[in-house]
Image (cartoon, grey):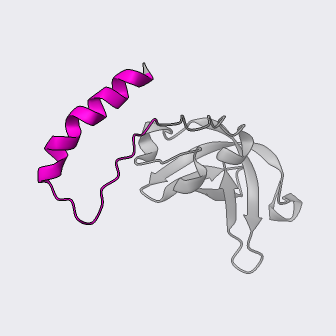
Amino acid sequence: MNKQHLEVGQVLEGKVTGIQPYGAFVAINNKVQGLVHISEITYGYVKDINDYLSVDDKIKVKIIDIDEDSGKVSLSIRATEKPPIKHPKQKRHTMTFYQSENEGFNTLKAKLQDWIKQTENRK
């Protein structure tokens, strides 16, 4: 298989041939090598590619771009995986305090007992 037979969207098996801080080089066959950019390793933040890949690992990759002029092949591991399920953020319970412009910090002490009573009444 040479570059003429590769198409964007194809999912292939490749072998990691090198790792750099910015990505991993993956051989698709004896003639074609592509790059999996660090942002395409997995979903979420990747600080160190070595935590996810090692040289000689066999991995599944998806072709996401082929630059016809330079011949560079861009690959993605992330595109072969299901995205993680996002859980809705939990609601936070907040209590609102109101203060008029005429009141300062001295009145906070006076209001404290009222606020404690309000909280106890809610239970």
- Residue 8 seen in the current view: yes
Residue 26: x and y, percent? Answer: 61, 50
Residue 6: x and y, percent? Answer: 84, 58
Q: Which is more toward the observer, 99 or 70?
A: 99
Q: Which is more toward the observer, 105 or 88?
A: 105
* Residue reaching furthest to the top: 123
Residue 57: x and y, percent? Answer: 57, 36
Height in image: 25 above or below 91? below
Q: Residue at x 36, y 30 (%)?
A: 118
Q: Quadrant of residue 34?
A: bottom right
The segment highlighted magenta reads 93-122
Q: Residue at x 62, y 34 (%)?
A: 87
- Residue 77 seen in the current view: no
Q: Which is more toward the observer, 30 or 73?
A: 73
Height in image: 91 above or below 9? above
From the image, which quarter does the C terminus lie in?
top left
Q: Quadrant of residue 42?
A: top right
* Residue reaching furthest to the bottom: 69
Q: Is residue 119 highlighted in magenta?
A: yes
Q: Residue at x 54, y 48 (%)?
A: 17
Q: Quadrant of residue 70?
A: bottom right
Q: Is residue 9 highlighted in magenta?
A: no
